[in-house]
Image (cartoon, rainbow, N blue to C red):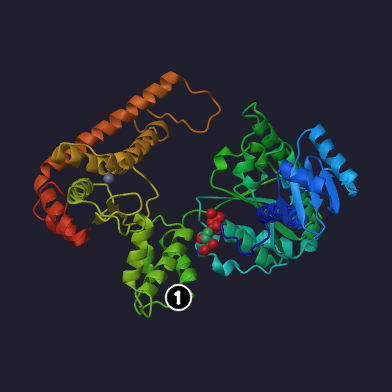
Amino acid sequence: MPTPTPRVSVRTRRVALACLAVVTFSLVIAASIVSYQRRQPQVQRINYSQLYSLAEAGGAAALQIEGETMTVTRADGSLVEATVTGQSPQNDVIQLFRKNNVPIEFRPLQPGVLVSVMNWGLPILTLGLIALVAWRIYASLSGRGSFELTDHNGQQTVGFNDVAGVDEAKGELTETIEFLRSPAKFSRLGGRVPRGILLYGPPGTGKTLLARAAAKEAGVAFLAASGSSFQEKFAGLGAARVRHLFAKGRKLSPCIIFIDEIDALGRQRGRGGDSASADQDQTLNQLLVEMDGFDQSSAVVVIASTNRPDILDKALTRPGRFDREIAVDLADVNGREAILNVHARNLKLEEGLDLQWIARGTPGFSGAELANLMNEAAIAATRDDASAVGRKHIEIARDRILMGAERQGFMMDEDERYATAVHEAGHVAVGLAVENGDPIHKVSILPRGRALGVTQSLPERDRFMKKREYLEDQIALLLGGRAAEQILLSTMTAGASNDIERAVEIARKMVSEFGMSRLGPIHLGQSDQPISQNLLDRIEEATNELINAQLTRACAVVTAEKESIGRLVELLMERDTLDADEIASCFSNSPYVRAA
Ligand code: ADP
Ligand code: ZN
């Protein structure tokens, strides 16, 4: 989520206060050291015998006694000092000086540096700390610092023109915008306008953007807070924050209050007996109270966003609260083109670079990823010193987003490269052999991100329905790397762990959510019912069966494709990265593999 206006956060203020405390403390130390040194003119140290002779000889100007330290001012003004422990030796000397009529002065014991630091520094520091804590508590009690009033009265920088591919959601918001523009008109007509709108959908699809744009379109203030900022260390503070947020909203009316990630505070109530969840329940209750408390005349609309609508407390979506739910989904190919258009506005594109082409090659990309794609492409073009963004730069950017950045300066030795090549070739072979998979687009043994190699497959089109065969093929593809290790290298590497993790995840979903196993149609959603251990065991078992069946299948492909895989490995060792055509050339005369 973008944060357009920088603001002084609680954190920076805390840091400032801490700095202040440190500075004060150092000043105290410095001051005491200076004053200590000032008190110390040049003094020569002498021992008791010397002091005794001095006393006997007479002619001293003065004697100062400060605890055990006896300081004599000689006739010429110079100072000598001796430490005399014990009452009677002191008395002896004092007697002698008295006899010689030397003025004697007793001084109170002066504190040392450390003592004065303790005396002054510690109280100051303690006071500072107390002030700091008190300030913190005050700040959170009053609910400050956690939310952001970005702009008064529609000075938002983004409008509906900057949000693309979500036309339905925009349409749903128009009525609300009308209402915010002229609340009076609506109340005259007696229409009931939704006060609470829930935007739900995957991350990065533009929910925040939509809410911001709505504020701009309506020309009203926009007050944004994140659901997680209501999770507080101190009980009751979350609720106080909610109260404060809505109080501010009412003051700014007409306005839009936006609560990002509302699931952080809107989870189902009464789950745990611990104090944290009790406090969270209290926060949520406060939110419900605030939403109920809107009178029809106040023009405040609350928009919340989440990608987990399923875990929200049912009370949140009752009439009068978030009773309008708007889905913000991943865009289809036309939507993606529109989004690309928005983000290409300020870029110089090469003649003939077709945004439709990019849109087709980026199925499943969210708006945020598309924005990122254009940005990365622009960076790649700049690095290239190119005058405009071209296909090449888009490809680089897409690889970067799909596979992570290439790791520079990370050298694998030849054995590792070979093992990686075999592993990736296994993925490729299985990916080509299965019938319902996505086409293999690229394979590389350049380390990227945390992976040593990557096989990239891209759907030809948006997939809205995932069939059992497709999921099985996905599992087989993921296990293809491991299969190749087992058969061609007679070993296993830890590099397959991520593949296995993803494969198991798919298999478990097939069993426990999609009902695609021998257990039949079961669904383990977010139900409140306790799940029996027996059922869990059976799910694990069925998941394993699915996995093992696909591993066997992957092994069969690898065994049958040994020769083609060998060619692919050789080419990979030579060129690091291969595209679809180069891959196809290795599999040209393989009967088992689908024409690549
Ligand atoms: P969400 O709130 O759904 O997680 P955001 O609204 O924070 O997503 O989107 C992040 C960024 O991605 C936006 O600032 C914008 O640059 C880009 N973006 C996302 N969706 C769209 C869209 N539909 N149209 C244009 N840009 C988008
Ligand atoms: Zn792998």
In the shown orientation, is residue 69 left or right of residue 459?
Answer: right
Residue 137 visible:
no
Residue at figure coordinates x 38%, y 78% from the top left: 388
In the shown orientation, is residue 413 left or right of residue 180?
Answer: left
Q: Residue furthest front?
A: 57
Which one is in front, 418 or 562?
418
Quadrant in which residue 270 is drawn: top right
Vertical position of residue 419 compared to residue 167: above or below: above
Residue at figure coordinates x 64%, y 63% from the top left: 6
Which one is in front, 81 or 384?
81
Which one is in front, 372 or 335?
372
Quadrant in which residue 383 is drawn: bottom left
Q: Position of residue 417 (x, y in %)?
A: 20, 51
Q: Position of residue 102 (x, y in %)?
A: 89, 49
Q: Position of residue 179 (x, y in %)?
A: 72, 61
Label 1 amino acid? Answer: Leu
Identify residue for label 1.
347
